[in-house]
Image (spheres, rainbow, N blue to C red):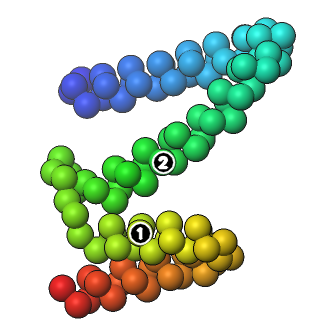
Amino acid sequence: MSAFWIATIGTSVIAFALKYSGHSVPERWLSHPKIQRINALIPIALLSALVAVQSFSEKSQLMIDQRVVGLSVAIIALFLKAPFPLVVLSAAVSSAAVYHWL
């Protein structure tokens, strides 16, 4: 058995154990207000990290390219309270324009 399959099976076992232990947590622990506030912020932190990694890195190198322009345009559109489809379209169009221009 190769190292790849050992890592795959090990990761699957760990994922199953984490999911199973999550179902075993008592309800009173999860209903605590501090835990609920933290759980509300976790998706925001994960999405922000994903956007940062996808916008400023390629493989293992730090990159600054057209994606930064698209992200900047999206942030400006959000500050101007534009509708979400307009935010996405403006970011995509500006990023594509800079990519085609370079």
Q: Which of 8 and 76 is in front in this view?
A: 76
Q: Name the residue under label 1.
A: 72
Q: In this view, does 97 lie above or below 20?
A: below
Q: Residue 12 location in percent, x, y?
A: 46, 26
Q: Please tell me in which quadrant of the rendered image residue 42 appears.
A: top right
Residue at x 35% of width, y 73% of height: 69
Q: Mark 2 points at which residue?
A: 48
Q: Could you say which disc has been placed on residue 64 in the image?
A: none
Neighbours of disc 2 within 10 Å: few (<14), some (14-19), many (20+)? few
Q: Residue 5 location in percent, x, y?
A: 30, 29
Secondary structure under badge 2? helix
Secondary structure under badge 1? helix
Q: Quadrant of the N terminus?
A: top left
Q: Is residue 90 above or below residue 80?
A: below
Residue at x 61% of width, y 81% of height: 86
Instruction: Tell me the kind of residue under disc 1.
Output: Ser
Q: Is residue 81 left or right of residue 72?
A: right
Label 2 to label 1, Cα distance in Å?
Answer: 14 Å
Q: In this view, does 83 lie to the left or right of 54?
A: right
Q: In this view, does 80 lie above or below 60?
A: below
Residue at x 37% of width, y 51% of height: 52
Q: Residue 23 location in percent, x, y?
A: 72, 18
Residue at x 72% of width, y 19% of height: 34
Q: Nearer the viewer, mark 2 or mark 1?
A: 1
Q: Is residue 29 left or right of residue 54?
A: right
Neighbours of disc 1 within 10 Å: few (<14), some (14-19), many (20+)? some
Q: In which quarter of the image is the C terminus?
A: bottom left
Q: Residue 26 location in percent, x, y?
A: 79, 9
Looking at the image, the residue that sits furthest to the front is 80
